[in-house]
Image (cartoon, rainbow, N blue to C red):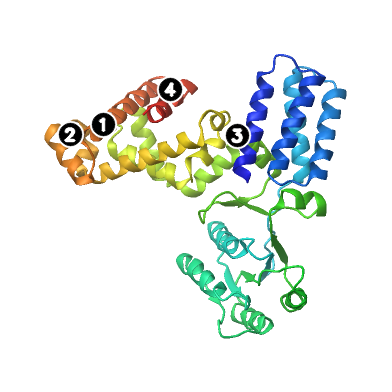
Amino acid sequence: MLGNLGENLTNTMKKLVGMSVIDKKTIKEVVKDIQRALIQSDVNIKLVLDLSKKIESRALEEEPPKGITPREHVITIIYEEMVNLLGSEAAGLDINDRPYKILFLGLQGSGKTTTIGKLCRYLQKKGFNPAVVCTDTWRPAAYEQLRQLTEEMDIPLYGDPENKDALDLAQKGLKEFKNRKVIIFDTAGRHKDESDLIAEMDELDNIINPNEAILVIDAMSAVAETGAPIKFIGTGERIDDFELFDPERFISRLLGMGDIKSLIEKAEENIDEDVAEKTMKNMMSGKFTLMDMKNQFEMMNSMGPMQQVLNMIPGMGNKITKEASKMTEDKIEGYKVMMSSMTEEEMLNPKIIKQSRIRRIARGSGVDESEVRELLKYYNNTRKTMKGIGKRGGRLGGGAMNRMMGQFMNR
């Protein structure tokens, strides 16, 4: 849903940027495009109408500040009003009590258990070591799903598939993990017509006395209706595709305006600084090797799907389609397979890779010899580009970036 919404809103902003005249007619046209994008993504119609009225009235009545063009002013208004729709500041968790207890709630099929796994990973990265208690006695696979998720991350889990008393499980889980910093409680998915489950939720709340109750839901409309803040957002299917929700950053990305702050944070979380520094020095000095290029690919992969990363770079997400990004990811994976068939000597000194070695590498990686030559051509072009950047003092301009990306996109 967010992918389609982001694409539609980005196209609307591109259309706005391309308009030669900003008048009443064009403003109404842009507002209709925004309405269409939001309604197609199941945002509440009343909220959509309220939002579009605010955007339209401000765009028609407000005078642009000095030094700001009418087009830039309309873009700013759209950005500000969409941020206001979702809340003005990041909420997050204020973990100070011990144990800090988080009660998870959600409708059936809302993705609650998967979200718990993602929050565990997020908390681990922040230096916390959470524990999980399963009180879902209604869904047979609930405990097993949690067991698989927590086992992969070495997160302690308390539960008993044979025990059908959710309240007893909660009490025993509290006792089991009383010395932990954070305890997360999974509960059964709710439905408005199941009075027993609603009553059980109230009793669990009394027993656990949580510091935080988190409802897993498609929150685009809910926040404006309830005033409750959005805490986190899932950005993809991977366990690491989960982040603190910041309305300003989220809307900036959604409108195709980039999010450099989140990109930097993602890099700091996932990239080995020593490897990155060594690779960058080699790139700038002209000593760039295939080993460095492989490290570069690994660092790119660790930050998530390419389209997600590109969307954080102002202007880049608009230029490259999802299909092109997927093709590029596939190309990189192919390059990595070929490099895994090379010797360390070849990786560190690619000049020695001649015809006989190309033949062996192709056989070892199950590809045509022409694909190995393509990899070597890409490497040589990248090395030349980086050497030129080093001579200019390490400035990576838009032209250089486009040339590097273009080598993939044009294949």
Q: Is residue 196 above or below residue 288?
A: below
> As rendered, which of 188 and 151 lies closer to the eye?
188
Left of 397 or right of it: where is 82?
A: right
Q: Is residue 235 above or below residue 372?
A: below
Q: Is residue 351 above or below residue 238?
A: above
Dot 3 or dot 1: first in sequence order is 3
* Label 1 crowd (10 A; few <14 / some 14-19 / many >=20): some
Question: Rounded to the nearest whole Å, what is the CA distance between mark 2 and mark 1?
Answer: 9 Å
Question: Rounded to the nearest whole Å, what is the CA distance between mark 2 and mark 4?
Answer: 30 Å
Q: Which residue is mark 2?
A: 353
Dot 2 or dot 1: first in sequence order is 2
Q: Which residue is mark 3?
A: 258
Q: Which residue is mark 4?
A: 393
Residue 88 in sight: no
Residue at (69, 42) in percent of width and height: 40
Q: Are marks 1 and 4 in contact (CB under 8 Å)?
A: no
> As rendered, which of 400 and 201 lies closer to the eye?
201
Q: Nearer the viewer, mark 1 or mark 4?
A: 1
Asked which secondary structure carries label 3, the reply is: loop
Quadrant in which the C terminus appears? top left
The amino acid sitting under disc 2 is Ile
Residue 347 in sight: yes
The amino acid sitting under disc 4 is Gly
